[in-house]
Amino acid sequence: MKRKGREVDFTEIPRSKKIKTPMATQKLPLTPQEQRLRKLLLDVAGFIDDAKKIEEKIELRFAGGWVRDKLLDIPSHDIDTAINAMTGEDFCLQLQEYCTDPKNLEKHSLGPEDLGSIHIIAANPEKSKHLATATKRILGFDVDFVNLRKETYSVDSRHPQVEFGTAEEDALRRDATINSLFYNLHTDQIEDFCGGLEDIQAKRIRTPLEPLTTFTDDPLRVLRLIRFASRLGFKIDPETEVPMTDPAVSEALKIKISRERVGVEVEKMLKGQNPLNALQLIDRLGLYQFVFTDPTLQEIPVPSTTNWHFAYDCLEVLKSNETPGSIYKSLVRSEDAKFIAWILTAAVPWAKVPLPQSAKPKTKLPLPYGTLVVREGIKATSKVCDVVTGAFRNFVEITGLRDAIKRKDAYVHERDTIGMSIRRWDFQGKNWRLQVLLAILVEAINNGQNSFEGLFSEWQLFIDHLTDMDVMDAPSLKLLVNGDELKAALGGVKPGMWMKPALDVCVEWQLRNPDSCSGSRNFGDPQKSHLATQIIFIYIYIPRNAIEMFASARKAAKSKISSKGISSDEALTLSSQCLPERYSLSQLYDGLELSNESQGKGDDLQNLLILNSCLSNSDRLERENGDAESIERLSLWISKAILPDKILNGQDEVSDASRGTALSLTHHKAALGLESLQILITQISSPRPSTIDPKTIITLITFSSTMDPWTTPAILSLSTSFLSLYTPQTHTQDLILTLLNTFIRPLFSHSKPRTITSSGRKAMPSSAPLPKHDVAAERTSKPWKYETVYAVRVLAWIVENAPGEIIAQNWHLFPPPLLTLLDDASTPFRATGSHLLSAFLPHLSSKLLKQSGIGEVFEDALLPTLLYLPNLTPVDESLRLLSSAYGALSVLCDVRYEVGEKARIEFLDRVMRMGVFMGYHHASEHPAIVQLLLEQTKVLVEKMGIHAVKHLKDLIPILSTTLTDPFAPSNPPLLLSAIRALQTVLLNCWPRISEPKYKMKIIKALSVCWTDVSASEDRGRLEEVQKDLKVAGRLLVSAVGGGVNVRAELRPLVEVNKDVGIMFGVGEGS
């Protein structure tokens, strides 16, 4: 089709779409009320014509959806009216003027209730709404008035130029042929310009024009077609469906269209006749990440939708089997709930992404990604967002209760325990029943089975159990007492933080005693008086008593620490004589005031000493029903208390004494804490839990390497032996993703390099200037470096220990922190980045590295490290950086390229020139650096093979200079590296070695070196050097022997120095 700009040339419309005349095809039967509306509008058109206000006669048409629904016998009270020669607003004003005449009102029997006011909806090209619309309620219909139009797009703008058009032009710019039909009010006939009638009969959805153009102009049309297909039960034409998956269209849908408009379409889909079909289409077309996303976030993970179909199929089966008492009937109890149920189904892939954690303790929890997606992605209401938040935060716990009911655990018959859990879930997110529904859908995804029979059986047991306990309506339980009554009963105690848990005690009592909750609301009632006494005992007496019972232990701990001194390596212990005779885990937690975060680091050590001593004297420990919760609270406190202090970051200028004190303090705390954790979890817990909190795992990992100053061999033994018990957990995808998404990602999010996108791929080059280095800003952007000093250890553990298949599946989570380390100015972090990259790369494929562009990004990050040379960089730091960088580049080469691939040789050439040659040029006076460069030369030449011949002109002088240095025999390792590099050159570049310029230099270098070594007084240290020199000399003879008579050339040399002949294998004694 020819276009001028992108204006349609109707003479070139394809045959299948060419306009046919006459266009009027059939009459459309109208209801009496519709006939009244038609006659009124026709009279208004005549009124305008008679007034001669415009030259062209007015033609009115009902357009689009109303005509389609009328043909499908679907009731509709929304009518779009298209006008040929006047804007909608102008026509409405003429309509109002017409209706001011009483005769006209009488003619059409119009009363005040039959005519509403005019509302103008302005155009908004930025959001692909290109035309203003006038809306007026008439005779019970909501009528939109708009002029017929055509749209012309220029090549340099996505906003069309809108102008008056014909009916044909207006039809062709619509989203679907079935929506391009007109009902002409004047002829009383349907007009079909695009084959819409035929498509309605075939139950087919097509676009009037070329689909890609249609969707690019307004990407929202993709969702509209999905909505029509699901609502009407039609099929999208294959030629139309293919461009719906075009990346340009998908990206435009994500960015160009306002999320309010996206939300409107999604809401109509999910409230429509067939939400299942709508989600199936979104899934099949691969549109999930463009519809259900949060475009306001630069850093957001991409959930897997591989098993999403199990969730929406599961909900549909639940719905289709709805009976009294069934799962669906019990959980989805209103029209709103039905809609939210489908919202949860749409969001369920995000449930596999770990919940984001607070950056600081006691701060508000960040919203789950699922909530952000429905709030920002489809602009859901706060009511919907609340349910999604609660569901995402609680579904794991809800599933745990279901499992406990299945196992018939004792506590599932405790009405107060179950009822309070339900009340808490409902308080956190409203509508706890829908939270249960999400738990079911998540399990359906996890199971990945087409049959839901077993799943439904278990959850029906859950519903029946709660129904039998009469706790389904626990959130709406009428309270026995309120806060004012409780305060009065306690003698006017001042309200405080105790109030809510005290009221919870009241609710628990009500749930335990459902038949005793009637009667007076006066605390003179014996039941309530007992309740008040219980509250005083629990919330006032017990905590004070617990604090006092550990007073002697606290005094003894303080004395022990003072007398031994923190700097002492001797283990800290307390005598059992200073401990209480009996104590419980809850008394330990309350008595040591572990919930008081204002305590100092010294208090932590005292508390750890007391706690460890008490746990070690297990015969004094009184067991309670709530021990599981106490163990969890104590474990989490220990896990946090023993973490290394930020003073150990190695970046800040602090005195050696201060750093030493902090280090000793950490050693003592870690030893006591890790031992206490082992006692709590492996001895006191019965049975030992199969999983532990990720925060505890992070702490164990923190002390998993003696490369960190805070880990001693003894601490390492405690940590690794404990960690090994949970290998099944630590090697699961859920745990690895939790560590990456909730711990590593937030710490590195503000220092992510600009070279990659949020999905881990190579980013487009930016013209923005690089930010200036600001030390103060760096402290804020790099908490992993200055605050959470153990973050890099956790990252290293993940890279080195996570199963390869998990790393491969979630590879995009690793480049941001690895590249951040590679870009850091500090030697330890930069070297660690190279080391971790070497461990990470083997899990990737060559195809992935090339297609994502991440291989090139890694190369660009590593190559500059090769220039960290003396004198600008201290020798020891330079050696560490160069060693790790060359190692990573070698692995990158092997993973990224096939052997013999041209790009592989070009890569090795760059490393040779930028690394070895430039490094030698700048640091040849540093023997340790030269040795490392020669060792890398050997590796590079081996990888290049015959292609290394191009570098002989640079390699031979470097090797010759090293071998002929008169001081070389004093440094055998350097000599060995040069000789072995030469051996590799001879083996791989032999076709060119026979050239005189190379051959003679090598002969001279080997001869001088042999002579110097032979004359050395330290022959014992040089024995290995001589052996390698013999290998090199004989390799040279073999390499050039086929082209020249090398033995004849060597004869004069051997005659002067017979020992040289031994090296080359010629002359006497060889």
Image (tube, helix red, strand yellow):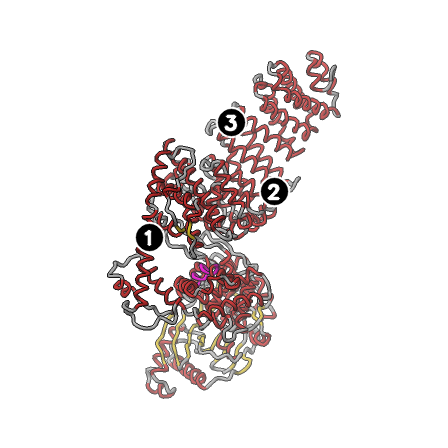
* Disc 2 target residue: 895
Inspect this view and state whether residue 3 appears.
no
What is the distance, in whole Å, between disc 3 and disc 1 at their CAs? 69 Å
* Residue 232 place in picture, x, y as percent: 54, 74
* Residue 405 place in picture, x, y as percent: 50, 64
Residue type at mark 2?
A: Val
Q: Nearer the viewer, residue 89 or 828?
A: 828
Residue type at mark 1?
A: Pro
* CB within 8 Å, label 2 to label 1: no
Neighbourhood count class around disc 1 (C-alpha, 10 Å): few under 14, some 14–19, many 20 upward: some
* Disc 3 target residue: 922
What is the distance, in whole Å, between disc 2 and disc 1 at their CAs? 61 Å
Span of residues in magenta:
385-396
Image: 768 above or below 517: above
Sequence order check: which comes first, mark 2 or mark 1?
A: 1
* Disc 1 target residue: 543
Image: 128 above or below 808: below
